[in-house]
Amino acid sequence: MAISLSSVLDELGIGIKPSGIVCRTPGINCLGVIESISDLDFKSPVPVGSFVWHAEPGWAPIDRMELERWLVDSPKGVHWIISERNLLDIEGVAILEHIDLTIWGIDDLAKWLGHALLSGRISLSIESNKSESINSISQRIKNNSPKPLNVVAYKPKVNLTEWLSQRGYERLPVRPILLEGRQWVVEGKLIGPDDVSERHSWKLIDDPFTGELSRYGDVESLPSIPHLERVTPLTLKTTEMVRSELPSICEERRHWRMDSGNESGTQGSILHWWRISEKDASMSHSPVLIPAWDVNFPGSGWMLVHGLTGEVLNSPLSNRS
């Protein structure tokens, strides 16, 4: 969102005070409690005293299971969830007796703000730096330690709905998560026939959950990092372990033109291996977040479905709602 939701609500006469609530459901953050509605002519969907929540953008939708998990930890009262993530199959969610819930998707918010803009109650001149951004508020509440500045999250290559359907599954309990891994940048020389060499660079993905070190390939990065549960690996490869795998990962087969050396001057080409000089290669790494889903399969229990490969792995998660 280009501007702060708190600024917009304040412009519309809806004052919010901090609630001190830290949500256990990743990606759904409490902005606070409505303490005043000064413009009574402009209809608010919830009254004074209501909790206001924000689900920040991300690739994973809010589904029935995630909403039910949020309901378990939510305090008694009236709640308004504003979601910038897609809403999926939430109509059948059983709302608890002590909870009065209003949930808006991005279309509901767009219509509401569009009406406010056309009626002159809100101005396009609102600047995001007039107050804390939505992300700043949620991060201040959630995080006690700084995150690496260069962390990136990968976009899933697997469509989970199609993946499950192809295997005969319809509706299963699913939890989107992020797996912590590393991205390596390797700079070095490729050595070819006759000791010919050339400078080259490689980008590698170090996935500790599959144990694979592979080339980056056609993986895409997400523009922002989803606020989802993260899984930290028990161990990571050392620099020397990665270096020892470079010859098999960075080698290439190329055509090399050859002169026969006879009077006819016949030339040809043959495939030769070009191999990295791993001892001379420079290496650096940065953290990455790999998409996955924790899926409860009938008869097998909770397993991980890898978001890049579709591989099914044992789930390291032990605490589930």
Image (tube, rainbow, N blue to C red):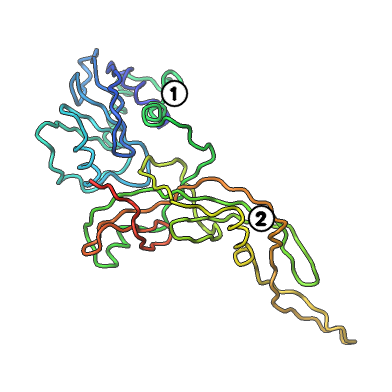
Which of the image's four quarters has the N terminus?
Answer: top left
Vertical position of residue 169 compared to residue 11: above or below: below
| Quarter of image, res 311 | bottom left
Query: x%, y% of residue 293?
Result: 34, 53
Q: Position of residue 111 (x, y in %)?
A: 28, 32
**76 vs 107, nearest the viewer:** 76
Residue 87, percent from left and from top: 26, 44
Front of the two marks 2 and 1: 2
> Which residue is drawn at the image coordinates 79% and 66% (left, top)?
196
Q: Earlier in the sequence, mark 2 or mark 1?
A: 1
Q: Are marks 2 and 1 in contact (CB under 8 Å)?
A: no
Q: Quadrant of residue 45?
A: top left
Using the numbered discs, state the Cα–Cα distance from disc 2 to disc 1 in whole angstroms: 39 Å
Q: For the residue labelled by badge 1, is the local secondary structure a helix, a strand or a loop?
A: helix
Image check: 74 left or right of 180? left
Query: How many marks can you see?
Result: 2
Horizontal arrangement in the rendering, residue 279 relative to residue 258 (left or right): left
Q: Residue at x 68, y 60 (%)?
A: 278
Q: Which residue is mark 2?
A: 201
Q: Position of residue 50 (x, y in %)?
A: 20, 23
Q: Quadrant of residue 190?
A: bottom right
Mark linked to residue 108:
none
- Looking at numbered disc 1 in the image, what kind of residue is underneath it? Ser
Residue that label 1 marks: 128
The secondary structure type at the circle numbered 2 is strand
- Amino acid type shown at disc 2: Ser
Q: Please state which of residues 314 and 16 is positioned toward the viewer in this rendering.
A: 314
Would residue 11 appear left or right of 130 to someone viewing this image? left
Q: Identify whether 42 is placed above or below 164.
A: above
